[in-house]
Image (cartoon, helix red, strand yellow):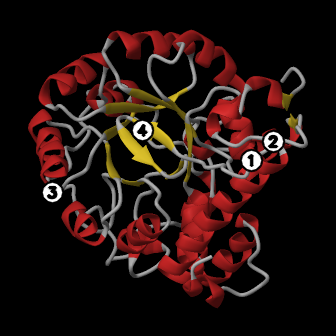
Amino acid sequence: MPSYLNQIPPDLASLSDYQAYAQRNLTEQAWAYIHGGSADEVTFQRNLSIYNRLQLNSRVLADVSKGNTELTLLGQRLAHPILVAPVAYQKLAHPDGEIASAMAAAAQDAVFCLSTLASQSLEDVAEHCDGPRWFQLYFQSEREHTLALVQRAEQAGYRALMVTVDAPVNGLRNREQRAGFQLPADVRAVNVTAPAVPVQIQQGDSRVFQGLMAQAPRWADIQWLRQQTQLPIILKGITNPQDVDKALAQGIDGLVLSNHGGRTLDGLPNPIEVLPDIAEQVQGRVPLIVDSGIRRGGDVVKALALGADAVMIGRPVMYGLATAGALGVAHTLRLLRDELELTMALCGCASLADITPDLVRYPKF
């Protein structure tokens, strides 16, 4: 373990330990935004329990002395399959914001994905992150503004675009409403420079259907984006096999199976529940990444066994950031990677290729 991680208090032994520290360090409003889910938070809570229903079929007496966690993802050679998910407004958790998280990810050999709604510029983050980095894209109301973001990401060395498709409007954030959440004056989406287009509807029209959703991206926008860039395009927010077929038809390079951490539509399945069927459907044509509820190295193994190529974590990064800045994020990633290696070793897996479906026992969901 790197020496700088020795500064971490001994009671921070797992990702869940960081949660309590983070809550103490954050305002009620910031905690509501970072920790909360949508509506009754049924999906959010299920994300945290679903992996416990899966059991591991460990194998013994295997030679794992030359083991590793390496993989190739979208043409990039990576040290391990744990990615940092795009999370908006990270300065809510710490003044160093996304720069701290990006530096920590680079120190731990993890892919860092920057949100369109980052509170620090994509150029500044790139300057401080010498590790692999991707850019998460929210379509803007005008294609020219979307293209400007894409071009900035290309010029700053981001090596993939992750397009979030499951949140054209915000989820029903009741926890935030009750806390009276508003962004502080010094926290904003600095990369979004175009003025917001006001929602205009006729009398009797729906603010959702004829208003907000009239500006939402559609499959034609994905087609257009594919023509604008040579970067790999990953769609984030897939849970329905019908959307998988459409994405593959568009020439998409990867999929993130995600319920947005339970922050958009309450009642969605956890990605692990649909992963085996979608993996069978995809047949390795594009990589599958899973998020929403990964908290242990054993969870990573379970996801990989059921068909994922990699996993992403979001809230745990924010808990680490709120607790100890870049050091907390680095330790969070290190903990998860150490747990992954330990779980692999105890299951007799010397490589990610050894993590096969027979390693998991699971009941019908």
Identify the residue shown where x is 15% and y is 22%.
227
Q: Earlier in the sequence, mark 2 or mark 1?
A: 1
Residue 34, position as x, y percentages in the image: 56, 62
Q: Is residue 255 above or below residue 114?
A: above
Nearest-to-viewer mark from 4 and 2: 2
Quadrant of image for the N terminus: bottom right
Q: Secondary structure at mark 4?
A: loop
Residue under numbered circle 4: 169
Q: Would you say the residues marked 4 and 2 are in contact, meaning their CB atoms lie under 8 Å apart?
A: no
Disc 4 versus disc 1: distance between alpha carbons? 47 Å
Residue 318, position as x, y percentages in the image: 54, 66
Instruction: Classify 10 Å Cα crowding around label 1: few (below 14), some (14-19), many (20 and above).
Output: some
Q: Earlier in the sequence, mark 2 or mark 3?
A: 3
Q: Quadrant of residue 188?
A: bottom left
Can residue 270 be seen in this snapshot?
A: no
Nearest-to-viewer mark from 4 and 3: 3
Identify the residue shown where x is 39% and y is 66%.
102
Q: Would you say the residues marked 2 and 1 are in contact, meaning their CB atoms lie under 8 Å apart?
A: yes
Nearest-to-viewer mark from 4 and 1: 1
Residue under numbered circle 3: 193
Quadrant of image for the C terminus: top right
Q: Residue type at mark 4: give it.
A: Val
Q: Residue type at mark 1: give it.
A: Val
For this view, does 124 lie left or right of residue 320?
Answer: left
Q: Quadrant of residue 270?
A: top right
Q: Earlier in the sequence, mark 4 or mark 2?
A: 4
